[in-house]
Amino acid sequence: MNTTLFSRWLPAIEQTSLVRRTALGVAGLAFVGGAVAGPAVAAHAAPEHVASPVSQSVMADKGNDHKSDKNEKDRKSDKRDKREGKDRKPSRDKLVPHGVQGGQSRIALSGEQSDNVKAIVKATKKAGLDERAAVIAVGTSLQESKLENLGHLGDRNDHDSLGLFQQRPSSGWGSPEQITDPEYSTIAFLKGLKQVDGWQDLPLTVAAQKVQVSAYPDAYAQWEDLAADLVANTWNNS
């Protein structure tokens, strides 16, 4: 071959080779020893198994749905616990720790009498005392007034006794208006009860008598069973 002619072709061959390598590189192929070696690995290749933005959003939504379901279950569980706690009556051991004494009496209550039971229980809670104190208070009121908020009864009145507990203004229990207020009269009774040493461990009739100083000290005992039932049915609803 003519040396001069070959020299003219050489630059053109090299230029063609360069163009081919450039095209293969753009297409993601490596040119090794004149042959395609396979896909080129980018210097900053993305990690494998990376979720797309759409997949990440779906996964996030599923996670939020799971948290929402769990929160809803927790709320339902809390409501159920509160409902069961509200429906659960105080134990008999708390209401009548030493059992009842003697024969027991019962009466059917009117709406007004039932409201007065609720008022006594509510006042007992306000005073910071427990179910046993409420039983003593309700039992005492059953004996004194049959749970009726009595005003002055004229000739039938026991001196100036008034209200649920037949407390007397002349004995320092309060004014007639105060004594005939169920909350006031209950809290006044409970203040007297708290001054009785060991009242929690006394039979109802003994604890009540130490506060009321009645002419019939054993009369309170007959109402303990009914008082316990009334408090049991009212305690968690007042």
Image (tube, rainbow, N blue to C red):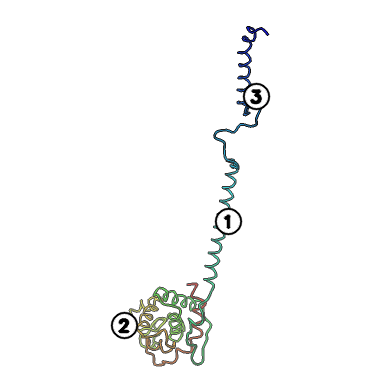
Left or right of 208: which side holds 72? right
Which of the labelled discs sits on residue 172, or is there none?
2
The mark that comes first in sequence, 3 or 1, is 3
Q: Quadrant of the N terminus?
A: top right
Earlier in the chain: of badge 3 and badge 2, it is: 3
Q: Which residue is mark 1?
A: 69
Question: Which label lies toward us, 3 or 1?
Answer: 3
Which element type, helix, strand or loop, lies under badge 3?
A: loop
Query: Which is nearer the eye, 151 or 181?
Result: 181
User: What's the distance in space between the residues labelled 3 and 2, CA to CA?
Assistant: 118 Å
Toward the right, the furthest residue is 1
Residue density around tag 1, few if under 14, some if 14–19, many if 20 or more, within 10 Å: few
Callout 1: SS:
helix
Q: Quadrant of residue 132?
A: bottom left
Work out how far the residue at label 3 is from the one at label 1, CA to CA, in angstroms.
62 Å
Q: Residues within 10 Å of mark 2 (few under 14, many from 20)?
A: few
Where does the image place residue 68, in percent across and percent down from the top left? 56, 54
User: Which residue matches tag 3?
Assistant: 34
187 in relation to 69, above or below: below
Q: Secondary structure at mark 2?
A: loop
Q: For the residues marked 2 and 1, what is the alpha-carbon distance in whole angstroms?
A: 61 Å
Residue sitting nearer the eye, 103 or 64:
64
What's the amino acid at mark 1? Asp
Q: Residue at x 65, y 24 (%)?
A: 34
**Which badge, 2 or 1, comes first in the chain's sequence?**
1
Rendered location of residue 17, percent (x, y): 63, 19
* Residue at 40% across, 78% down: 186
